[in-house]
């Protein structure tokens, strides 16, 4: 109707207390929930309707409005039935906002009564009667301020003013959004073309061929620009489709594109966010194109390989076993180099698989870039788009194979020659020097800690015991661990004494009787007079050894007795001393233990020499593996860029032209989709709607709410 404002009015039911007739028992709760549902909208204006002939303090509408709008920013008090008040009374105090103040005040109205409705009295006549009542009232007619607060016309004008004020606050953003949507629609129309183009395309194959070449060139240029970082990608989505994604239907398909431009009391979010509108361009906080490939190279591949350790999947037991296998039949005088070669090759091979995976990641990213590089005009020709994707997919697949082969060849090249003369390689001499320095530092720290512990012990004991026993000085006090040195030097002869049998102790304590079991004491006192490797080998000829001349064999006999005793336990009733001489001498028969099927280096605890050799090998492996890993991290991205990325970028246009630009297929490839005409009409209608919306926004800027 041209006589009312374009407002959406929701007439909510009044709050009741008692159910009548066939109403449910919880009618009060249902009506309250219904009112709360609509009144909770922050963009809704609340009209708290109260009868003027009742006490305002008992108004349920004002109570509910205060709960939903504590600040009173969107609540207007409406007083009805002013004509039914007792004679001599009026609502001037309430209208002056003195009884229960509201930020937006009160407005009084006089509506048609039930008799007027039954008599079919029109609304226009009712408005004239209302105006006559206020104009002839002895109190209201004398106050000009009250006359602006009375009447349905002033209420409508007041609501319209609130709406226009809200529109003006959101006007700059609203206008900018409408302008942006008009630009998108125009771009869509340009991509779809005009109806006149269809006649030209159907009549001239040369025109179709020229347009085909233009699309292929534009696609190749977009692909190269996205890889090189020269494309803003402002007109494309991540899926490569144009910005207006809602294709089906007419004008109603764009109903939500205005961001809620319907001017209503319960829908005033004109400048609010539009969840259904299309997002234009890529996000400012997201990488795309060539930047994503760079991210794969440096953040995914390089960072992952830097986390790969030189000893991942390689234990010290395996290193000891490899060194033992490399020694062969006799222990080597120095660390065998073949063990380093075997172990470092094994660790280098682990780098091949991450490089191949990096090729796959870049391949997937190139497919993504290809889908984003499609020009908006390409959606007009679905046959051309499908064929183009097939050609690009085939080109990428042909390039992935050689790239993966070359990445694997980088590892094979490293495995073909272990360059121990590399300037960054630590080398054997420096590895030994560092190990010696490390062991010296550990020994020094251990000595300092031992001295501190002795001083603390002396302080705790008080120097001299209470029983008169003098404390033994630290330097003369016998050590329970012997003369063991912490952090012994590599390949030292004294370190082997820990694993030798202390024959002197047994001969002196047992009065020449051989023990049945000889326990190897690693922490026992070392023989300073007869220590060393040569003394261990030729122990029987050492004149300083206690016992008989055959003392050199005593340790072996004791070991044999121990083995025989252990083997005797598993025999059927055989005595453990069956092999011993009844006179107490050495056993009559010497038996060796059974050789196990599987021999492991880790069955026995590592010696000092094995520990030193293991540390040296680990230092060499860590140094050389770091060199190879550094070279691999540098070479894989270069290989991928040369054989895959740059190759596809350079050959794309030639490949597309050679595969698609054929005279017999031009007509098929340049055939428009069936929905192009419908989409073209939809865009034209949408452009007209946006133009009208922009005109309305411009009119709101100059609208005066006080004009009638």
Image (spheres, rainbow, N blue to C red):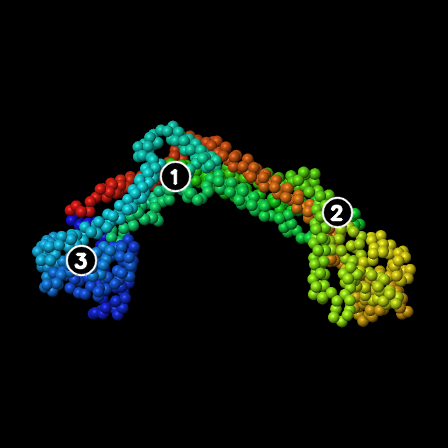
Residue 697: image location, x then y, percent: 25, 43
Q: Residues within 10 Å of mark 1 (few under 14, many from 20)?
A: some
Residue at 76% of width from left, 50% of height from top? Answer: 490
Give the number of the mark in front: 3 or 2: 3
Residue annotated with mark 2: 335
Q: Position of residue 330 (x, y in %)?
A: 80, 50
Q: Which residue is mark 1?
A: 235
Please give left or right for residue 561 compared with residue 430 in the image.
right
| Residue shown at 24% from the left, 53% from the top | 265
| Closer to viewer: mark 1 or mark 2 | 2
Please state which of residues 549 and 452 is positioned toward the viewer in this rendering. 452
What is the CA distance from the residue labelled 1 to the residue labelled 2?
66 Å
How busy is the neighbourhood of tag 3: few (under 14 within 10 Å), some, or many (20 plus)? many
Q: In the drawing, does residue 126 fall left or right of residue 35?
A: left
Disc ID at residue 95: 3
Q: Residue at x 40, y 36 (%)?
A: 375
Q: Is residue 1 visible?
A: yes
């Amino acid at each position: 109707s041209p006589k009312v404002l374009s407002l959406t009015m929701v007439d909510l039911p009044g709050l009741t207390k008692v159910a009548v007739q066939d109403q449910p028992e919880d009618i009060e709760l249902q009506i309250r929930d219904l009112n709360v549902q609509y009144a909770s909208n922050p963009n809704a204006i609340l009209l708290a309707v109260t009868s003027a002939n009742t006490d305002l303090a008992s108004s349920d509408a004002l109570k509910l409005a205060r709960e939903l709008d504590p600040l009173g920013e969107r609540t207007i008090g409406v007083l009805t039935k002013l004509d039914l008040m007792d004679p001599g009374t009026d609502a001037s105090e309430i209208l002056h906002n003195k009884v229960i103040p509201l930020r937006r005040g009160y407005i009084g109205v006089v509506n048609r009564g039930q008799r007027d409705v039954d008599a079919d009295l029109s609304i226009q006549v009712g408005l004239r009667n209302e105006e006559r009542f206020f104009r002839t009232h002895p109190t209201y007619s004398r106050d000009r301020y009250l006359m602006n607060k009375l009447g349905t016309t002033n209420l409508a004008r007041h609501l319209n003013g609130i709406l226009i004020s809200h529109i003006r606050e959101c006007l700059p953003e609203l206008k900018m959004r409408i302008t942006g949507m008009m630009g998108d629609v125009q771009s869509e129309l340009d991509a779809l073309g005009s109806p006149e183009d269809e006649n030209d395309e159907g009549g001239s194959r040369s025109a179709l061929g020229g347009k085909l070449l233009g699309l292929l060139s534009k696609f190749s240029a977009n692909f190269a620009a996205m890889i090189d970082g020269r494309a803003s990608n402002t007109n494309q989505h991540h899926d490569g489709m144009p910005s207006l994604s809602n294709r089906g239907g007419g004008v109603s398909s764009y109903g939500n594109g205005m961001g809620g431009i319907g001017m209503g009391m319960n829908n005033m979010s004109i400048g609010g966010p539009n969840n259904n509108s299309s997002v234009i361009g890529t996000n400012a906080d997201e990488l795309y194109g060539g930047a994503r490939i760079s991210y794969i190279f440096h953040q995914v591949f390089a960072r992952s390989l830097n986390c790969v350790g030189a000893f991942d999947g390689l234990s010290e037991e395996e290193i000891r076993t490899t060194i033992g296998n490399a020694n062969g039949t006799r222990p080597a005088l120095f660390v065998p180099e073949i063990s380093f070669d075997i172990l470092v090759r094994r660790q280098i091979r682990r780098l091949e698989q991450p490089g191949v995976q990096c090729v796959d990641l870049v391949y997937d990213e190139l497919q993504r870039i290809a889908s984003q590089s499609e020009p908006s005009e390409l959606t007009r020709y679905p046959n051309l788009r499908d064929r183009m994707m097939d050609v690009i997919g085939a080109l990428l697949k042909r390039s992935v194979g050689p790239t993966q082969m070359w990445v694997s060849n980088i590892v094979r090249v490293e495995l073909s020659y272990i360059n121990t003369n590399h300037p960054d390689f630590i080398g054997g001499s420096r590895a030994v020097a560092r190990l010696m320095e490390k062991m010296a530092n550990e020994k020094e720290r251990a000595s300092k800690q031992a001295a501190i512990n002795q001083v603390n012990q002396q302080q705790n004991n008080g120097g001299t015991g209470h029983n008169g026993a003098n404390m033994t000085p630290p330097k003369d006090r016998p050590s329970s661990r012997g003369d063991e040195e912490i952090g012994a030097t590599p390949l030292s002869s004294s370190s082997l004494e820990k694993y030798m049998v202390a024959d002197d102790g047994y001969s002196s304590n047992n009065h020449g009787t051989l023990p049945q079991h000889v326990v190897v004491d690693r922490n026992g006192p070392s023989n300073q007079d007869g220590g060393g490797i040569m003394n261990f080998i030729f122990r029987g000829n050492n004149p300083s050894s206690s016992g008989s001349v055959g003392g050199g064999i005593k340790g072996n006999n004791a070991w044999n007795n121990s083995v025989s005793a252990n083997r005797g336990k598993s025999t059927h009733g055989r005595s453990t001393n069956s092999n011993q001489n009844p006179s107490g001498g050495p056993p009559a028969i010497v038996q060796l233990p059974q050789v196990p099927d599987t021999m492991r280096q880790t069955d026995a605890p590592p010696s000092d020499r094995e520990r030193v050799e293991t540390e040296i090998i680990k230092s060499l492996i860590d140094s050389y593996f770091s060199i190879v890993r550094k070279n691999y991290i540098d070479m894989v991205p270069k290989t991928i860029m040369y054989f895959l990325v740059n190759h596809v970028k350079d050959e794309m246009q030639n490949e597309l032209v050679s595969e698609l630009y054929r005279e017999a297929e031009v007509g098929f490839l340049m055939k428009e989709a069936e929905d192009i005409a419908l989409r073209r009409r939809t865009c034209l209608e949408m452009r007209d709607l946006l133009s009208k919306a922009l005109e309305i926004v411009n009119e709101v800027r100059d609208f005066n709410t006080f004009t009638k």
